[in-house]
Image (spheres, grey):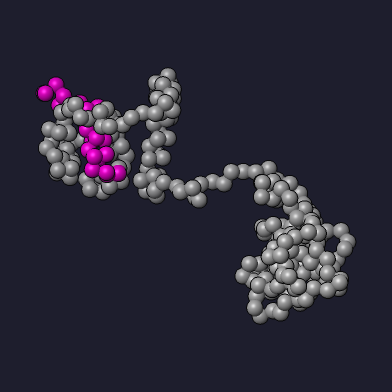
């Protein structure tokens, strides 16, 4: 037993074991013991050995004896119930194949990531970086679709080209058009950029770009009228001049 006293690796294994058993983070341990994060990290990496007063504090914090931290036990972390999956075994093999510099870099990265997780928690799916998509150019007609009482149709060249992500839900987008007015609030605001699929056929209930009497509207298609989502605006009856210019896919 005495041969184990002062063994940094055994101490590191035991600290990690009881941290896992008590569900404690490094940050919580540092606060409880009054030590710096880097100091505690050196203990759990086996780089240094805590003073006797800190060992006693840890033992009291875990509700164990000092011997439980100092001495080697068969229930230490190596047998703490972890079952490695093949991917983890492969990572360990790669780690063991590194030189001392490589292992130091991996350890440094793991320490930084562990500190990030303990401080801020794990990122949820919604918080993870969005997968990058290639971009493509489409024509943009600035404020040419009225979400109000009507905007004269401009049938000339687009104002400019803009880039949009070439992701699956945008594959059918033909052009972009700006919103002028507030009749489609809350779905679309004045100045929004709508992404439009050029088509003359849309279903009742879809939102589209329509032309009536040489005026251009963004509206929801009804059975016999174009519907404004904002109840402060009247719906527009369909007549023989009505034409569908496209279906709204989304907005930027």
Given residues 100 and 142, the one toward you in this image is 142
Given residues 102 and 117, the one toward you in this image is 117
Q: Is residue 124 above or below residue 102?
A: below
In the rendered image, residue 28, in percent from the top left (x then y), is placed at: 27, 47
Q: Is residue 124 visible?
A: yes
Q: Is residue 250 above or below residue 212?
A: above
Residue 8 painted magenta: yes
Given residues 245 and 154, the one toward you in this image is 245
Answer with left or right where residue 79 lies relative to residue 211: left
In the rendered image, residue 3, in percent from the top left (x then y), is placed at: 14, 21
Q: Which residues are magenta?
A: 1-25
Q: Is residue 202 above or below residue 222?
A: above
| Magenta-drawn stretch, dominant element (helix, strand or loop) | helix
In the rendered image, residue 68, in percent from the top left (x then y), is placed at: 15, 33
Going 25% across and 28% down the picture, which residue do you hit?
Answer: 79
Residue 246 painted magenta: no
Answer with left or right where residue 33 lies relative to residue 191: left
Image quadrant in which you'd find residue 212: bottom right
Q: Quadrant of the N terminus?
A: top left
Q: Is residue 182 visible?
A: no
Going 16% across and 31% down the picture, which residue do you hit?
Answer: 70
In the rendered image, residue 139, in percent from the top left (x then y), is placed at: 79, 55
Answer with left or right where residue 168 lies relative to residue 128: right
Image quadrant in which you'd find residue 222: bottom right
Q: Quadrant of the C terminus?
A: bottom right
Going 13% across and 36% down the picture, which residue do you hit?
Answer: 66
């Amino acid at each position: 037993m005495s041969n184990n006293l002062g063994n940094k690796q055994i101490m590191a294994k035991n600290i990690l074991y009881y941290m896992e058993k008590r569900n404690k983070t490094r940050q919580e341990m540092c606060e409880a013991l009054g030590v710096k994060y880097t100091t505690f990290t050196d203990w759990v990496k086996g780089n240094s050995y805590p003073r006797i007063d800190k060992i006693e504090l840890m033992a009291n914090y875990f509700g164990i004896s000092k011997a439980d931290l100092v001495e080697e036990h068969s229930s230490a972390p190596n047998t703490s119930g972890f079952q490695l999956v093949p991917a983890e075994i492969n990572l360990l093999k790669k780690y063991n194949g590194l030189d001392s510099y490589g292992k130091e870099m991996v350890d440094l990265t793991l320490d930084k990531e562990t500190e990030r997780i303990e401080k801020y928690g794990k990122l949820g799916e919604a918080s993870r970086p969005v997968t990058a998509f290639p971009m493509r150019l489409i024509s943009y007609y600035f404020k040419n679709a009225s979400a109000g009482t009507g905007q004269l149709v401009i049938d000339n060249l687009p104002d400019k080209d803009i880039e949009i992500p070439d992701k699956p839900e945008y594959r059918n987008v033909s052009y972009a058009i700006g919103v002028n007015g507030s009749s489609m609030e809350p779905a679309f605001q004045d100045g929004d950029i709508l992404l439009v699929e050029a088509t003359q056929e849309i279903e009742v209930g879809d939102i589209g770009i329509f032309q009536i009497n040489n005026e251009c509207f963004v509206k929801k298609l009804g059975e016999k009228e174009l519907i404004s989502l904002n109840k402060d605006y009247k719906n527009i009856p369909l007549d023989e001049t009505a034409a569908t210019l496209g279906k709204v896919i989304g907005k930027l």
